[in-house]
Image (cartoon, rainbow, N blue to C red):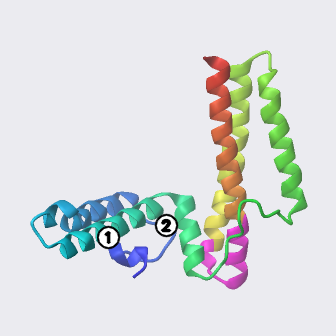
C-alpha cells in the first residue's frame, strides 16, 4: 500500500495539505499504540508498526519536495545520490555563482541587505524551478518524469543553500 492509499487520496503532487493533516490525525488515533496497551504483545507491535508507517507517510506527503521524490520513486525514476554530479553545466555554473554570492554576504558593508537580496534571488529561482517541476510531474511521461527528477535535485540544492544563508545570517547578526 503506497502512502497516498493510506490516506485515501489521489496520487497527485497537488494535494490539500489541510485535508491530509485531518486524515492523518483521524488514522493516527485509530492505530496509535496507546489504544493497544492492553492487547497482546503482538497487537502492540503491530500497532507500533502501523503508527510508524502512517507517520512516515504523513511526513513524506506533507512536504512538497519529499512528496515529489516519493511520486518519482513510485513512477520508477531513480534519484541519484546527492554526491552524483549534474550533467547540466549551466546549472553547475549557477551553483558556483550562488556560492560566491553567499560568500560575499560575509564581507558586505550591509549584511542585512545582502542577506535579503540573496534570499530574494534564492526564492525567485526556487519558485521558477518548483513550478517547472510541478508541470513536469503533472505531464507524467517518461521524459517529463526524468526532467522533474533533475529539477528536484536542483530544488534540493536551493533549499540547502537557503538553510546555509539562514545559518550565516544568524551567525553574522548575533
> Which span is picked out in magenta?
137-150
Closest to the observer, 43 or 95: 43
Closest to the observer, 135 or 89: 89
* Quadrant of residue 27 within the rendered picture: bottom left
Q: Is residue 10 left or right of residue 37?
A: right
Residue 16: x and y in percent read 40, 62
Q: Secondary structure at mark 2?
A: loop
Q: Which residue is mark 2?
A: 14
Q: Main secondary structure of the magenta part?
A: helix
Can residue 147 be found in the magenta stretch?
Answer: yes
Q: Nearer the viewer, mark 1 or mark 2?
A: 1
Measured in 3D between alpha carbons, the distance from the residue under mark 1 to the one under mark 2, in whole angstroms, is 28 Å
Q: Is residue 169 above or below residue 123?
A: above
Residue at x-position 74% and y-position 26%: 114
Q: Quadrant of the C terminus?
A: top right
* Quadrant of residue 109 within the rendered picture: top right
Residue 91: x and y in percent read 84, 56
Q: Which residue is mark 1?
A: 49
Whether residue 16 is visible here, answered yes or no, is no
Circle nearer the N terminus (1, 2): 2
Q: Is residue 133 left or right of residue 58?
A: right
Residue at x-position 81% and y-position 42%: 98
Q: How many marks?
A: 2
Residue 24: x and y in percent read 30, 63
Whether residue 96 is visible here, answered yes or no, is yes
Packing grade of label 2 (10 A; few <14, some 14-19, many >=20) is few
Q: Secondary structure at mark 1?
A: helix
Can residue 69 be found in the magenta stretch?
Answer: no
Packing grade of label 1 (10 A; few <14, some 14-19, many >=20) is some
Closest to the observer, 140 or 3: 3
Amino acid at each position: 500500500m503506497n502512502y497516498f492509499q493510506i490516506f485515501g487520496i489521489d496520487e497527485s503532487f497537488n494535494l490539500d495539505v489541510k485535508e491530509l493533516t485531518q486524515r492523518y490525525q483521524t488514522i493516527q488515533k485509530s492505530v496509535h499504540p496507546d489504544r493497544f496497551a492492553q492487547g497482546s504483545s503482538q497487537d502492540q507491535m503491530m500497532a507500533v508498526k502501523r503508527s510508524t508507517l502512517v507517520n512516515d507517510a504523513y511526513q513524506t506527503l506533507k512536504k512538497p519536495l519529499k512528496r515529489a521524490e516519493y511520486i518519482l520513486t513510485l513512477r520508477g525514476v531513480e534519484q541519484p545520490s546527492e554526491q552524483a554530479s549534474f550533467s547540466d553545466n549551466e546549472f553547475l555554473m549557477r551553483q558556483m555563482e550562488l556560492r560566491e554570492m553567499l560568500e560575499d554576504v560575509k564581507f558586505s558593508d550591509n549584511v542585512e541587505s545582502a542577506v535579503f537580496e540573496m534570499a530574494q534571488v534564492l526564492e525567485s529561482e526556487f519558485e521558477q524551478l518548483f513550478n517547472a517541476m510541478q508541470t513536469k510531474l503533472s505531464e507524467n511521461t517518461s521524459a517529463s518524469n526524468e526532467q522533474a527528477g533533475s529539477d528536484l535535485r536542483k530544488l534540493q540544492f536551493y533549499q540547502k543553500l537557503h538553510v546555509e544563508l539562514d545559518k550565516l545570517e544568524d551567525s553574522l547578526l548575533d
